[in-house]
Image: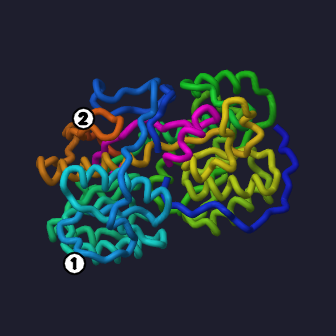
Amino acid sequence: MKKKLLAITLCLAMTVSAMAGCGSKQDAAPADTGSQSTDASAQSGGEKDAAPASSDSAAPADASGSGGGDLEGAHVLLLKAAGTFTTKIYEGYSDYMESHGYKTAEKSPTETTVAAQVQIIDELITQKVASITIATNGDAGYDEVFKKAKEAGVIINSVDSACNPEFRTIHVNQASSEALGAYQVRAAVLQALGVDYPGDNMEKAVDDALAAYTGDELRIGVLSASIDTPVQNGWIADMEKELQRPCYQGKVSPDLDKKYGNDDLTASTTQAQAFMSENKVDVIIAPTTVGLAAQGQVLKQAGSDMKVTGLGVPSEMQAFMPLSSDENAFDYVCPYMMLWDLGHLGALSAAATLAVMNDGYDGKEGSTFTMDAWGDYPETTFTAIPASDGGTEVIMDDPYVFYKDNMADWINKM
C-alpha cells in the first residue's frame, strides 16, 4: 500500500491528561486468542452478555501519592505514576479492601522511575505497612528494597508490570501477554485495511482481509513506554510472535518500528510527531494509555488519515473515537482500542493480598484463591499459572474492545 501523504503541521499544545500504565470486562469479548486461569464455572472466555461495571465507591480518604497519616498496618497500592489509570485501579482496590475491614493508601510517584518507587517503598517499610502491591517502572533496581520489605514482614505482590518473582507471592495480570499482543496487531492491521471492528473473531477477520489484500507490505509502528518496561516489552514480543503467522507473510512486515515515550506526555508527543514526519508506517500501536492519547492528539491535530490503536481509557480517548453506532469509525484517528476493567483489576489485586495474609496463600503453580463477589462480578476462583519470568501469575480476563457501539457507555465509568 502506498503511503498517503500526511500533514506535517503539528500542534505542540496537548490537552489530554497524563496517565501511566495501561481494562474492562468485555460485553462481546473476542474469543480468538488468550488463555484463562480462572475457574471455568465462574469466568469463561468467549462472548459475554454484559460488561460489569466497577463497584461504585466513595473517594478513598487516603488516596494520595504523598499524603501523610498513620500507615501502620495499611495495604498500599504503588503503581507506575499518579494519574487517571492509577486512580481507577485504586478505586477498586480500596473498595474491596475497605469492605473487608482494612485500611488502604495509594502512593504512586509523580515520576515514572525506578528510583522514585524505591524511595516510596523505603518510606513505607519505615511506616510499617502490611502489604505493597506494585506495578514496576523497570525490571531491575528493586531487589535490595524488596529484600528489606520481606525481612520486615511486608507482603509483596505485583500487578500489571511484574516485580522479581523472588520477592512477590503472586503477579496479577490483567490479560495474557499473548492475547494482548495478538489483539493489538489484529486491530492495527484491520484498521490499516479500513475494516471496522468485526466483533468476537478478529483472527478470522484478519485472515480474510489479508487473503484479499494485494497492495504493498504494511508497516506497523509501536509507541511504547520506556525501553526497559517489562510489561510492554512482553506485549511487543507477543506482537512479533503474532506477525509470524502465515497470513501476514508478504502482507505485513514482521519488523515493528518501535519508539519510546517513557509514559510521559511530552516525550510521547515528540515520538508521535516523529512517526508523522518520518512517514514510514501505515498504522500505529500504542500499548500504553499515555502514548495512545498522545498519538491520537497528534494525528487529529494534523488532520492525518493514519490510524492508531492500542490500550486506552475511554474518558481520555473520547475526542479521538466514534461514540455512536451510526458514525463512521474511520472518520476518527482511533476507530477502536482495547483495555480491561481497571476497578476489577484493583479489586482482584486486593483479593490476592488478603488471600496471602489471611489464608496462607503461597502463589505456587496450581494454587488457588477465591475473590468474593464484587460489583457485578460473581465470586470467582483464580488459579496460579507459570509466568514468563519464572514466577507465577493469575490472569483476570481477555482484553476488552472499546468501539463505536459501547464507547458512550464507558466514558463516565473509566
> Where does the magenta region start and end?
389-414
Amino acid at dot 2: Thr
**Position of residue 88 in the picture relative to residue 363 (left or right):** right
Residue that carries the numbered disc 1 in the rendered image? 126
Residue 280 in percent (x, y) is at 77, 51
Residue that carries the numbered disc 2 in the rendered image? 381
Q: Residue at x 47, y 49 (%)?
A: 234
In depth, the one of 143 and 133 nearer the eye is 133
Q: Secondary structure at mark 2?
A: strand
**Position of residue 302 in the picture relative to residue 396 (left or right):** right
Residue 73 in percent (x, y) is at 18, 66
Q: Residue at x 84, y 51 (%)?
A: 6
Query: Which quarter of the figure has residue 274?
Result: bottom right
Q: Is residue 401 magenta?
A: yes
In depth, the one of 101 and 37 nearer the eye is 101
Residue 11 in percent (x, y) is at 78, 65
Q: Quadrant of the N terminus?
A: top right
Q: Secondary structure at mark 1?
A: helix
| Residue ranking furthest to the front | 58
Give the answer, above or below, for where 77 lies relative to 24. below
Q: Residue at x 22, y 78 (%)?
A: 126
Whole-number angstrom distance, CA of label 1 to CA of label 2: 34 Å
Q: Is residue 114 magenta?
A: no
**Position of residue 247 in the picture relative to residue 410 (left or right):** right
